[in-house]
Image: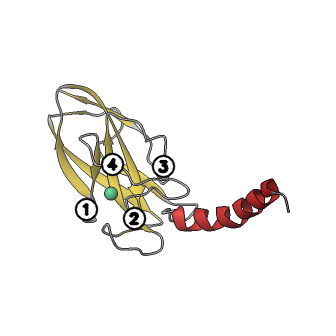
Amino acid sequence: MKKSTMTLLSALLVAPMMTFAGSMMSEAPDNAEVYFVQPTDGATVGQTIKVVFGLRNMGVAPAGVDKKNTGHHHLLIDTDVPADLSKPLPATDKIKHFGGGQTETEIELAPGTHTLQLLLGNHAHVPHSTPVVSDKITITVK
Ligand SMILES: [Cu+2]
């Protein structure tokens, strides 16, 4: 057998196993939905903002708890959803984790226009295979 054929064969055998072992993603139901209860899109708010997270057709579980059809909230502030959703979400000033299973928070923002978006992550902070992400809302802080 030629070396190139062997390489191809081993790649074919190894690739599916690596995909399985390497993926930290969880499945989400098709009708899963994450949204802001408050604030609403276009709202004008003070500098201390109560944010309430809504989730339909899935449950909230703390980080570390691997239970089907659950996840925990991540609040994206003035940033886009990361391009690579196959990895755990970083924890930054712009990506806040609610790994305790919290469904609301209070944030402080400077006066001006800001965007907020919610993205659900699984037990390992990885977005689901079909990402459960809210609309991006814009608020004005006075
Ligand atoms: Cu997280």
Question: Closer to the observer: label 1 or label 2?
Answer: 2
Distance from disc 4 to disc 1, alpha carbons, whole Å, reads: 18 Å
What mark, if any, has residue 111 been given in the picture? none
What mark, if any, has residue 85 been given in the picture? 3
User: Do the numbered discs 3 and 4 sit on residues whose CB atoms are within 8 Å?
Assistant: no
Residue 28 visible? The answer is no
Residue with the mark numbered 4: 90
User: Do the numbered discs 4 and 2 sit on residues whose CB atoms are within 8 Å?
Assistant: no
What mark, if any, has residue 102 been given in the picture? 1
Q: Nearer the viewer, residue 124 or 21?
A: 21
Residue 141 drawn at (x, y percent): 21, 29
* Residue drawn where x is 66% and y is 65% of the image: 14
Q: Secondary structure at mark 4?
A: loop
Q: Earlier in the sequence, mark 2 or mark 3?
A: 2
Q: Is residue 78 above or below residue 135?
A: above
Q: Is residue 1 above or below residue 67?
A: above
Residue with the mark numbered 2: 71
Q: Earlier in the sequence, mark 1 or mark 3?
A: 3
* Residue drawn where x is 36% and y is 37% of the image: 41
Q: Nearer the viewer, residue 85 or 29?
A: 85
Question: Closer to the observer: label 1 or label 3?
Answer: 3
Residue type, mark 4 in image: Pro
| Residue 46 placement, left or right of 122 | left
Residue type, mark 1 in image: Gln
